[in-house]
Image: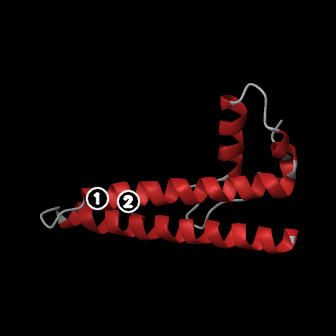
Amino acid sequence: MTPASSTTERSPSGLFRMSAWEGEMERSHPQLPRWYWNEAERRKQYARWVEAEAESLALRLAGMLRPDTPADSAGPARLLVESLARDAEWARSLEDRLLRNAA
């Protein structure tokens, strides 16, 4: 039942795909909310999900880094934190564009 028009949408890192979010929605809701069938609203909810997930993961990972974290772990972790921050920013700009288009 995944709407085909949205399955290729993904965050810049590729970690957050709309098709994954749609699958999660379909698995976790016995009856999908009405807004789900409205493409603009579905994309807005997806953007909010990306923002929340990316920010949460970035904060948790950044919080684990300490001055004594080995460089071979800290370097890639910092790169991932930066990538997640870009995903969150992308999601905010996607939602802003969607809101402007709806006005």
The type of residue carrying mark 2 is Leu
At horizontal 71% and vertical 53% (from top left) the residue drawn is 45
- Residue 90 lies left or right of residue 64; in this view the side is right
Name the quadrant containing residue 56. bottom left
Q: Which x, y percent locates residue 43?
A: 76, 57
* Residue receiving disc 2: 59
* Residue receiving disc 1: 63
Name the quadrant containing residue 24. top right
CB under 8 Å between discs 2 and 1: yes
Q: Which x, y percent locates residue 11?
A: 62, 63
Image quarter of the N terminus: top right
Residue 8 visible within the image: no
Residue sitting farthest toward the left? 68
At horizontal 81% and vertical 74% (from top left) the residue drawn is 100
Q: Secondary structure at mark 2?
A: helix
Q: Is residue 74 above or below residue 16?
A: below
